[in-house]
Structures are given as C-alpha cells and as structure tokens.
Amino acid sequence: MLRSLTIESARPGVQQRSTTALALAEEHYFRIQKEDEQIGAFLTLCRERALEQADRIDRMAAEGNPLPPLAGVPVAIKDVLNTRGVRTTAGSKILEHYIPPYDCTAVARMEAAGAVVLGKTNCDEFAMGSSNENSAFRPVHNPRALDRVPGGSSGGSAAAVAADMAVAALGSDTGGSIRQPASFCGVVGLMPTYGRVSRYGLIAFASSLDHIGPITKTVKDAAIVLGVIAGRDPMDSTSADLPVPDYVAELAKQARGLKVGVAKEYFGEGLDDEVRHAVESAIDKLKHLGCEIVPISLPHTPYAIPTYYIIATAEASSNLARYDGVRYGYRARGVKSLSEMYRRSRDEGFGAEVKRRIMLGTYALSAGYYDAYYLKAQKVRTLLTRDFEEAFQKVDAIVTPTSPTAAFRLGEKSNDPLAMYLADIYTVTADLAGVPGISIPCGNTRDNLPIGLQILGRHFDEATVLRIAHAYEQSWAASALRL
Ligand code: GLN
C-alpha cells in the first residue's frame, strides 16, 4: 500500500521492525521500474547509495536504537541539488556527465536524519520553466493525466511523490517551482522563507530568489522535512541564524482565531472558473474552522511578473557565466581558439529557454538599460515586499490559488514563452518578497485534475502556514470519510 505510505507511517514501521528500510527501498524501486518509463520523473537512480543507507538504518533499528525522524524513508531529490558521487545534471546537457564532489547541505541533512535517497529527479533545465518541458532529457508526464504536464520546474519531484515512487522529495522554488508542480500533481509543496534552508550545494539559478523545500503527501510530512533541513549553515552566509521551531508540535494548535487575508488581486482576470470555485470553497471551509477571513489588497501584484522575469534572468545570466567549458561540464570538440571553445560549448550545451534567459538578463544588466530595467525592478521588488509587510500587520496568513489553471496539456504552451511566464502570476510574488508559502490540494476539476490552494505567511513563520494547511487538510480528510 504505497499510496498511503507517509513519513509519519513509514518510520514507526522501520523502528518496530514490522518492515525494513531495505524492503521500503526495494518496493519503491520496483514501483519506479513499473511506472517511470511512462512518467519520466527520474533522471538517475542511485541504488547502491540507497541500499547502503537502508542497511545502516536497519542495523540501527535491530540494535534497538531510537531512529532519527526520516529513518528509512525513501526520498527523491531534484537534480539541481548536488549529490556526492551521483550525477547531477540540472536537467541540462551542459552538466550531463557532472559528478559533484560534495553533497548539498539539505541532502546531507536528509540523509543524516535517516532518509534513503532513491535517485535524482527530472526538472526544467536549470529550473527555468513551469512545465518540465525544458528538460534537456525528456519531458515528465503528470501521473494524474499522462497527456498533461506535471508543472515545473520541480516536475519530476512532484510526479515521483504523486505516483508513489517516493514518499517525499526535495525541490527548489525560484518563482513557484515547488508550489506549482505540487498543485498540478495533487501533492503538498512547501517553500520556506528565504534564508530558512541553506542553499549550499544548490545549482544556482537566481541566488536572491532560490529556495529549497519539501514536496510530500501530507502537511505533517512537510513539517517533518522542514524541521530536518532548516537552520543555519556556515556554508551559506544567507542562511538565517534563528531557532527552528518544532513544526510538528505547532500543528497541534488549531487554526481557530487566526486572521486569513484574501487579496482581490489574486482573483482577477485569467483565473479559471473551476479553480476559483475550489479556492472559494476552501476559504469557506477555513471560516468554518474558526479563521477570520479579511479582505486585503496587495496593490503591486500586477507588476510581479515583469519584475520577476527581469531579476531572475539578470541573476541567471551572471550565475550561468561559469559554464564556460573550462572548469567542468560540457566542452565542445574540434575548436580552433579559446573564444570558439567558449562560444560553442555554451551554444551546444544550453537549451533554447536557458539561452533566452541569458540574453534577457544580459540585456537588462547592460550599460544604458541597467537603470531602466534592473534597478527599476529592484525598486518594484521593494514595493511588492512592502505590500506583504503591510498586509501581515492585519492578517496572519494569506490564501490564494496556487496557479490560475489546473495542469495544462503537454505542448500547449511550449511555443509561447510569454503565456508560460504569465502562468506564474500567483507564485512569483512570494519569492520576490522572501515570504514562505505552501500549496495543498483543495479539490479537482471536472476532468479530475488537482487544484492547489496556496497559503502564504510572514517571514520565518512557516509554523502558521503549516497550521492552517494542516487544519484544512484534516477537515478535508474528515469530510471525505463521511462520504
Ligand atoms: N516558472 C518560473 C520560471 O520559469 C519559476 C521557476 C522556478 O521557480 N525555478 O522561472
């Protein structure tokens, strides 16, 4: 019964020896072998590393030692997170054969907490995309409807969890890449506050916007993983030196009495009717749970997409300058000069979307345009952040749709980059402001495609976000049981 297997249910089984970490890993590999040919969630499996870790956990259990919070839990890791000795591609041809010499801090913390890393998941190249169609290797199919995209850029991670090929996964979110695929695949995706989780070992896309976070089947599982990966890391100077609360204990607090804001800017033009209806019902549900619903405004929201696509591309153009064919990654053959080597390595190694971003970013940063685009975007970013700060004086959290539509069809937007960018409208704001956000399932369309509810919170207040999400999820489970 992989479907119902969560972190919460897997670990006690391993501890009490009713199952073993090895059996869990094998069961998941079997499932991957059966399902993943059509889904395409994994790029690399690391069986040896997984079975070694599983064996270590089983020996600890046999000795009767208390096990750490993720003991024996099979997990999947987005392929932008470095894993020592295991190929890490960032979904790009330029890193197709790259084997990192070190582990990303978040992955190291997962393994130290007992997680069993099954493999690395497919994603849009360098995490640039909203559909996973920008992977240099293959697209991912949504397990809920194979002709649909799983969302992106952490599409492989979301699909792996949704298809029971992993109990939990790590993703990264720069403009929505954890929350949007979670919403498209019907699972939970949490983006922590900027600085809550170390970015050390994350292949950089846009450093001021990049976040690592969990994709899980339940809110409680997201709380458990966050507790494991959060906290100061001397290897990332932007990681915050703040105490990490016991997120699971926080869940026990009710949602009653919390003030929840609803911003009109998130319910305007372009929002699909079925999504609107599901999110409005979810808001009603929160009211029944004792939350006070407060209408609010985040007036600069209409400027978020252009702001994001200037800052993200500017930072990307700088971060991706390191792929020059010299130090690591793909190098073109048969070149006659150094400059030809740079040019051809980048031309042959990067895909179309990555090149588009590098060009956009370089343009926005170039002399004469810097003030008009990049500097202006930074100013608007401050205004967007202030919108949230003002709103959070009045409310404890904000609820919105995660995405204006449910999962679209493969190929539907791939020739229209602008349409693809516009679909990020509800997610990029939180990345720009650095506030935490979660996406949880809140219903299905008539075609049985999942719909996501987004809950945003104050800086470093993931606990409240999780509390509301958990209360909603529990009430949903309760009403499903009554049916
Ligand atoms: N879809 C957005 C983009 O293409 C966000 C990507 C992300 O969060 N990594 O940039």
Image (cartoon, rainbow, N blue to C red):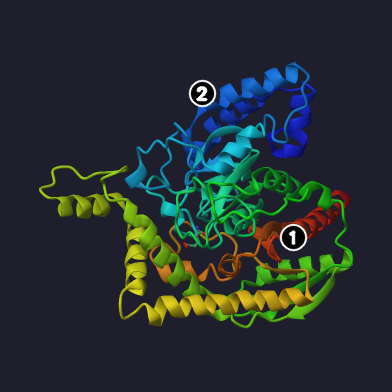
Lateral position of residue 287 relative to residue 345, left or right:
right
Quarter where residue 128 is shown: bottom left
- Disc 2 C-beta below 8 A from ligand 1: no
User: Measuring 36% from the left and 58% from the top, which residue is drawn there?
Assistant: 354
Secondary structure beneath dot 2 equals helix
Q: Is residue 220 above or below residue 306?
A: above
Lateral position of residue 357 relative to residue 1, left or right:
left
User: Measuring 21% from the left and 55% from the top, which residue is drawn there?
Assistant: 343
- Does any portion of residue 165 appear in the rendered image? no
Q: Looking at the rendered structure, which numbered label has been put on residue 455?
A: none
Q: Is residue 86 above or below residue 360?
A: above
Mark 1 surroundings within 10 Å by alpha-carbon count, few (fewer than 14), some (14 through 19), many (20 or more): many
Q: Looking at the rendered structure, which numbered label has been put on residue 48?
A: 2
Whichever of labels 1 and 2 marks the residue nearer the N terminus, that label is 2
- Whether residues under marks 1 and 2 lie with C-beta atoms below 8 angstroms apart, the answer is no
- Does any portion of residue 95 appear in the rendered image? yes
| Number of numbered markers | 2
Quarter where residue 161 is shown: top right
Secondary structure beneath dot 1 equals helix
Say which quadrant the N terminus sits in: top right
* Distance CA(mark 1)–CA(mark 2): 37 Å
* Front in this rendered view, residue 276 or 104: 104
Q: Which residue is mark 1?
A: 465
Q: Residue 333's x, y, as percent?
A: 17, 42
Q: Residue 209's x, y, as percent?
A: 52, 62
User: Measuring 48% from the left and 41% from the top, which residue is drawn there?
Assistant: 82
Q: Amino acid at mark 2?
A: Glu
Q: Residue furthest left?
A: 336
Q: Amino acid at mark 1?
A: Val
User: Measuring 54% from the left and 75% from the top, which residue is drawn there?
Assistant: 381
Q: Residue 155's x, y, as percent?
A: 53, 50
